[in-house]
Amino acid sequence: MQLTQSSVGRKIIMAVTGAMLFAFVCVHLLGNSSLFFGSAAINAYAQKLHSLGPVVWIFRLVMLGLFAVHIIFGVQLTLENKAATPDKNVQVKRLKTGFAAETMVISGLALAIFVVYHLLHFTVRVTNPEIYVPIEGGKGMVDVFIMVTHGFQQLLPVMIYSIAMLLLFLHVSHGFQSLFQTIGLSNDRTLPVMGNLSKLVGAVLLVGYVSIPLLILFGLIR
Ligand code: HEM
């Protein structure tokens, strides 16, 4: 309870939930990479996940909770910081920040909107009925390889995903270094290293994720 009442506590909550969401994004990318190994690989992976039954639903609820907490505290901290900013007319020495740091709440909220679209596209499967084809012998399951490859033969979804992945890069490239600051692992000496490491991690996610829709659009995965 006390954790939620101080701004340091709220920062710790942001760091912990952010780290867990980051872990999900990394594992999800690894899972999606099975697409590079063909239809059998990604469908086997999807079937394995779905066979876990209630565990998948518990996982989904935990993810939803983490997401909600991360967004609520993120917006709250941003509003608090804004309220604490001194009068515009008073000259203040601004802390060294950057575009990614200053747009964290915008990139975060835009990513939340993307996740809703992504769930409708590939999990609830309502946006593009033509790409949801049942898999042979799959007890009503959809062929995930066809869904993803046909889904990314259309320009609009590829553009939406590419913009979202750029936002993910921005968000992670500041969030990762911010996490180290919150848990006290960064100082004047290590800060530049953490900054570069964060950008590298964000870039790996960007290239890894965006390569899937782009390779499909350009006919290199079919
Ligand atoms: C090119 C990028 C991506 C591809 C190809 C992709 C692919 C998929 C697929 C195929 C599913 C459905 C799995 C199934 O039900 O069988 C899925 C679910 C999901 N994806 Fe992605 N994804 C991408 C990016 C992302 C990103 C960046 C995030 C988070 C920021 C994300 C979050 C999720 C979530 C939360 C689910 C629901 C998991 C569940 O059903 O339990 N995805 N994705």
Image (spheres, rainbow, N blue to C red):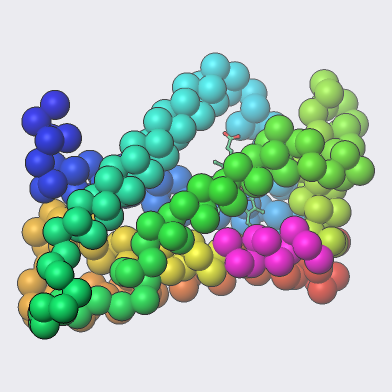
Q: Is residue 184 visible?
A: yes
Which residue is painted at 61% across and 67% down in the image? 163
Give me the residue at 11% from left, 78% from top: 90
State left or right for residue 131 relative to residue 81: right
Looking at the rendering, in which quadrant would you find the C terminus?
Answer: bottom right
Q: Residue at x 62, y 56 (%)?
A: 33
- Identify the image quadrant of residue 207: bottom right
Task: Please name the predominant secondary structure of the magenta segment in the image.
Answer: helix
Residue at position x 37%, y 71% from top?
100
**What segment carries the magenta color?**
155-164
Q: How many marks?
A: 0
- Residue 102: name its quadrant: bottom left
Compared with residue 95, is residue 152 higher up or lower down, i.e. above or below?
above
Classify residue 156 as left or right of residue 49: right
Q: Is residue 201 visible?
A: no
Membership of 174 in magenta stretch: no
Which picture quadrant has residue 108? Answer: bottom left
